[in-house]
Image (cartoon, rainbow, N blue to C red):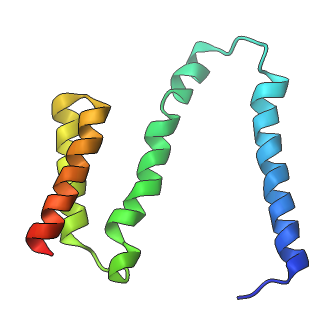
Amino acid sequence: MSFTTAQIWIIIIGLGLGSYLLRLSFLGLIGGRDLPEWVLRHLRYTAVAIMPGMITPLILFPQATGGALDPVRLGAALATIAISLWTKNATLTIFGGAAVLFALHFAIG
């Protein structure tokens, strides 16, 4: 699928406008008001909901393997989850997961 230059610019402008309107709805229209507690409670889970959605396809269908399940990435993901649950420390989780990824990469190949 190929797009013309005009179509690409229309897509870019449309995405920029949509992004601006989403931010305006929170910052411009209700930014100066206090939000109800139930809204604030739900907003705290936004990153927790978005991160797995971004990371899961990279683990289950990595482009480096042509979309096939890779035991190295799957093992590193499981180790990262275990480290996170055990330590409750984001820094240790990141570095521990990276260490397991590199170790499994060199051990398994």
- Who's the residue at 70% across and 88% down the image? 1
Q: Nearer the viewer, residue 96 or 45?
A: 96
**Can you say whether 75 is above or below 90 in the image?**
below
- Residue 89 picture location, percent across and down: 26, 29
The residue at the point 20 percent across, 35 percent down is 85
Q: How many labels does the image show?
A: 0
Give left or right: position of 84 versus 30. Answer: left
Image location of residue 99, percent across then percent down: 19, 51
Q: Residue furthest right?
A: 6
Which residue occupies the foreground of this view, 56 or 41?
Answer: 56
Q: What residue is at 31 percent from the left and 80 percent from the top?
A: 68
Is residue 5 left or right of 70 when viewed as pictured?
Answer: right
Question: Could you tell me which quadrant the C terminus lies in?
Answer: bottom left
**What percent of the width, then of the height, locates residue 6?**
91, 76
Q: Which residue lies furthest to the left in this view?
A: 107
Residue 97 higher or lower than 5, as above or below: above
Q: In this view, does 77 lie to the left or right of 17?
A: left
- Occupied quadrant, residue 91: top left
Q: Position of residue 72 (x, y in %)?
A: 20, 67
Residue farthest to the bottom, as pictured? 1
